[in-house]
């Protein structure tokens, strides 16, 4: 071990002496990893292979005390700080170069109360791990669509998921948060305690502190649901999307959520997939989705009963760790004929077989919650449009990023809303970040001024303080 050169919050690099680092290491119950230590490269590896950052210190926290010590150490030494939960964020904000990473991934405690239908879960859990525990009691809450996503980042950014139309977003199902502030204090935020912070943590991302645990409301779900996909050839995609639009506009129950994805099938052909989940009795779901199954007819019908844990991991294979990823996101009010033409025509030129374009239905319970009830304010949107560009060869980055940006520019005229905070990349303009927070932005700035006036927590979709 030698002295470490580290990045600071104020710009110039500085040195941390070996003695200072070793004292910090000795105070942790978890592990402190530095460059040259065994396991360093593994500890700095995250889901998006395009991110290759080299922190000076990685504090793998074993509990809240380690988080507090790490925050105090970062603040006292003016260190650039990143926070890692599941490490699945596409922008790579879980890491930083030459600063400190406060790594929550070892913190995987969870306690399910099947009587109250609640769960207290630590911030290092993934949704697959969370669902494994809650489904033992036939319970769940709205989680993401990829089981390796961390619960922390998804929740703090709002939380779209298969159950949202019935139970609301993930953040709508949080009863309380435990959070370590920039001053190293542990506070609880709920309806009755620090209610301003409780509002802001439900959609304000990681701007105010480090959330160490979440208390969720659970609901009876599964264990078996009607779910799966229908595949049609891309040449039928415009017809499929227009039928999909009419099917949605005719009215569907909250139990049903239906998305459309344009992708490359295993045989190399471009297809459009209708992916759905019915959160209710299978017999009732079969009647509701029958028109979708009859239309076309599809090339393939993969709809059938499956466990909720399988539903929430249905797309895992399409998003393996290590691939390079670049995303763009936008909310849409509707699907016009012109927008459908634009989407299908541009996807027909897709530059990578690993790229997926999604048109995800929102509405239902999400729309019935007041816009100002939580910091997530995009309550009245109809669809979430997302370009999920992926590739495995690093040398191909320029062409795939260029294709994605061109597509994103073409879709802009069809939306008056911002994007989804959890799907923003690391190259977003300030205006794009502000629009992602929507009408909540000014109130979020006030919270930032109160809880993090020095912007210690800045490696996120950042809300700069004004004090």
Image: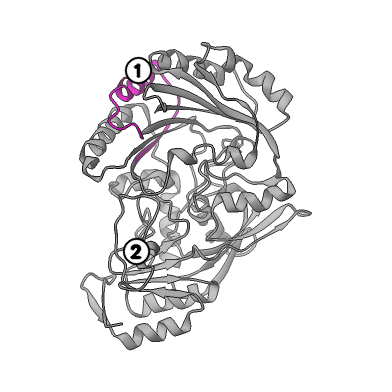
Q: Which residue is mark 1?
A: 341
- Say if the magenta span includes residue 112: no
| Cα distance between the residues tagged 1 and 2 | 45 Å
**Res. 394 in view:** yes
Q: Relative to 14, does residue 340 appear above or below in the rendering?
A: above
Q: Please indicate whether residue 379 sits to the left or right of residue 340 in the image.
A: right
Q: Nearer the viewer, residue 347 or 385?
A: 347
**Where's residue 294, x and y in %?**
58, 12
Residue pushed farthest right? 115
- Looking at the rendering, the stretch of residues picked out in magenta corresponds to 327-354
**Where's residue 308, x and y in %?**
64, 39
Q: Nearer the viewer, residue 175 or 71?
A: 71
Q: Name the residue located 71 percent from the left edge and 50 percent from the top edge.
A: 136
Q: Are marks 1 and 2 in contact (CB under 8 Å)?
A: no
Q: Name the residue located 42 percent from the left edge and 81 percent from the top edge.
A: 25
Disc marking residue 73: none
| SS state under label 2 | helix
Q: Which residue is mark 2?
A: 41
**Where's residue 206, x and y in %?**
44, 58
Q: Please indicate whether residue 467 sits to the left or right of residue 259 in the image.
A: left
**Where's residue 184, x and y in %?**
47, 75
- Say if the magenta span includes residue 334: yes
């Amino acid at each position: 071990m030698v002295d470490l050169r580290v990045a600071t919050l104020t710009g110039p690099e500085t040195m941390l002496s070996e003695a200072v680092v070793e004292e910090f290491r000795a105070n942790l119950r978890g592990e402190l990893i530095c460059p040259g230590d065994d396991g360093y490269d593994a500890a700095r590896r995250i889901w998006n292979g395009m991110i290759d950052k080299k922190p000076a210190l990685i504090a793998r926290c074993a509990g809240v005390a380690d988080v507090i010590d790490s925050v105090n150490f970062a603040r006292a030494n003016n260190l650039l700080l990143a926070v890692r939960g599941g490490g699945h964020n596409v922008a790579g904000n879980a890491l930083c170069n030459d600063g400190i990473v406060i790594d929550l991934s070892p913190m995987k405690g969870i306690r399910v109360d099947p009587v109250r239908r609640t769960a207290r879960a630590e911030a290092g859990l993934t949704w697959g791990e969370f669902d494994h525990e809650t489904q033992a009691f036939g319970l769940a809450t709205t989680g993401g669509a990829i089981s390796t996503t961390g619960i922390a980042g998804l929740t703090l950014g709002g939380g779209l998921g298969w159950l949202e139309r019935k139970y609301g977003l993930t953040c709508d199902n949080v009863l309380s948060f435990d959070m370590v502030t920039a001053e190293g204090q542990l506070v609880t935020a709920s309806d009755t305690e620090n209610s301003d912070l409780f509002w802001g943590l439900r959609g304000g991302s990681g701007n105010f502190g480090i959330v160490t645990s979440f208390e969720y409301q659970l609901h009876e779900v599964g264990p078996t649901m009607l779910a799966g996909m229908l595949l049609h050839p891309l040449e039928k995609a415009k017809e499929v999307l227009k039928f999909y639009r009419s099917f949605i506009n005719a009215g569907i129950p909250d139990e049903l959520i239906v998305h459309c994805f344009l992708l490359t099938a295993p045989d190399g052909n471009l297809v459009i997939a209708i992916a759905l989940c019915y959160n209710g009795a299978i017999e009732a779901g079969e009647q509701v989705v029958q028109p979708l199954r009859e239309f076309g007819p599809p090339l393939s019908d993969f709809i059938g009963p499956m466990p909720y844990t399988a539903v929430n991991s249905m797309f895992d294979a399409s998003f393996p760790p290590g691939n390079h990823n670049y995303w763009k996101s936008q909310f849409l009010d509707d699907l016009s004929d012109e927008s459908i033409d634009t989407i299908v025509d541009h996807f027909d030129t897709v530059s990578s077989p690993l790229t997926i374009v999604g048109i995800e239905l929102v509405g239902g319970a999400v729309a019935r919650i007041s816009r100002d009830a939580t910091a997530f304010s995009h309550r009245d949107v109809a669809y979430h449009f997302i370009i999920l560009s992926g590739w495995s060869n690093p040398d191909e980055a320029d062409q795939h990023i260029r294709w994605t940006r061109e597509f994103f520019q073409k879709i802009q005229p069809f939306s008056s809303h911002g994007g989804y905070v959890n799907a923003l990349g690391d190259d977003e303009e300030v205006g794009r970040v502000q629009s992602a927070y929507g009408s909540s932005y000014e109130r979020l700035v006030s919270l930032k001024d109160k809880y993090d006036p020095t912007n210690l927590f800045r490696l996120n979709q950042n809300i700069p303080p004004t004090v």
